[in-house]
Image: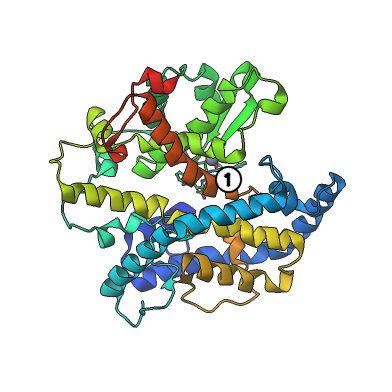
Amino acid sequence: KKAGSCRNIDQLSETLARSRSYDEQLEAWAGWHATARPTRNDYQRMVELANEGARELGYKDLGAQWRSGYDMSAEAFAAEAERLYGQVQPLYKQLHCYARARLQNKYGADKVPSGKPIPAHLLGNMWAQQWNKIYDLLEPYPGVANLNVDQSLKDQGYDAQRMMKSAENFYVSLGFPQLPGTFWERSMLTRPQDRNVVCHASAWDIDSRRKDVRIKMCATPTEEDLTTMYHELGHIYYDLWYADQPFMFHGGAHDGFHEAIGDTINLSMTPGYLRTINLVGDVKPSQQFVINQQMKMALDKIAFLPFGKLIDEWRWKVFSGEIRPENYNAAWWELRRQYQGVAPAVARTEEDFDPGAKYHIPANVPYTRYFLSFIIQFQFHKALCQAAGYKGPLSECSIYGNKEAGK
Ligand code: LSW
Ligand code: ZN
């Protein structure tokens, strides 16, 4: 780190992912969260304006508008989300308990006390939303075939273009068309050196009827960014596939469907598939290997569930006025504690605006869509594997190359 130079979110995230020093991680966490403090007033004003717009359209507030996109009343949807969360919460509680014990082992009982929330900066991710980056600390059977896709991508000289080609190839193998030439000309796949851009990955239906679809992201050769490409391509193929439908049908059946397509395809990136495309070597199958793999999956998919639920719980209450501006941060941390069981390791006040440190809050992108996606993507995966005639355990099923599933 150069003296006087600012680290960006990618660099700070890298520290959280790789450093195992309590203080170094805390510094990265606190530094990023400090950047959101000056956005509080603008956010408060945005809430007023957004609510004004929602009310002109006949909704109670913007939260009610967001809850109205699911073919049921806003109240019924909130209840449905609660019901779903109740079904999966026991899984999260077990994972949380296991992770806390392992982290206590690593950092000591003074830093990670039993029966208390986990410090929010120790889970390998800025928002503690996915925990797979600390897999090394939580691996059930140490040393049993930890697949290193990052290393293979680097060793084989993958760049962003080639990674995207690899992701495209999966969709093509199912029977989808190749991406249009303009996708490659007009997308931005790496961080430009000459200007500051929004690097948070996104997919854009600019004019899908003329096949103008694009991805904007700042990719480096990592498994995480390859996964992100699968995610964004799910949006892109959805856009292309529905381009000739009437405008009302351009979006997903609901927004969770749109989010789930790419992640579903990603569930087919099994060790077997990764072997096929030469990103991992041969693995000796064993019960211990299966458990390790499933832990890695849980650190991504189970860890996410309370986070996916709480973001809009906070916003619904902000939009309705139940959470007032003078309570923004305290209410945020109350939800983080209740749902995720995490707590900030340094004191927070209403001078801070920690929700603003998560992209979707200032960008005003709804978040319940991801909670829904992290449930239905497994239902989609199961259905696709059935369509492919697959018989074995779902965790080993890959629909790569299967035209029946593609159909
Ligand atoms: C999306 N981006 O595509 C959004 C952009 N490394 O990260 O946020 O919290 C205008 C409209 C602008 C892999 C990784 C809509 C932007 C699979 C994360 C669900 C970060 C990649 C970000 C929305 C990718 C959670 N994902 C998050 C995003 C936008 C997540 C994943 C996820 C993505 C979520 O929807 N699946
Ligand atoms: Zn998405």
Determine which residue is flagged by label 1.
369
The residue depicted at 62 percent of the width and 22 percent of the height is 208
Q: Nearer the viewer, residue 366 or 168?
A: 366
Whole-percent x and y of residue 83?
Answer: 55, 55
The residue depicted at 32 percent of the width and 59 percent of the height is 134
As drawn, the residue found furthest toward the bottom would be: 110
Three-letter residue code for mark 1:
Arg
Query: CB of residue at label 1: within 8 Å of ligand 1?
Result: yes
Q: Nearer the viewer, residue 82 or 98?
A: 82
**Left or right: where does residue 249 sit relative to residue 348?**
right
**Left or right: where does residue 314 sit relative to residue 302?**
right
Whole-percent x and y of residue 19?
Answer: 33, 63
Look at the picture and state if 305 lies above or below 99: above
Whole-percent x and y of residue 407?
Answer: 45, 19
Q: Nearer the viewer, residue 216 or 271?
A: 271
As drawn, the residue found furthest toward the right would be: 56
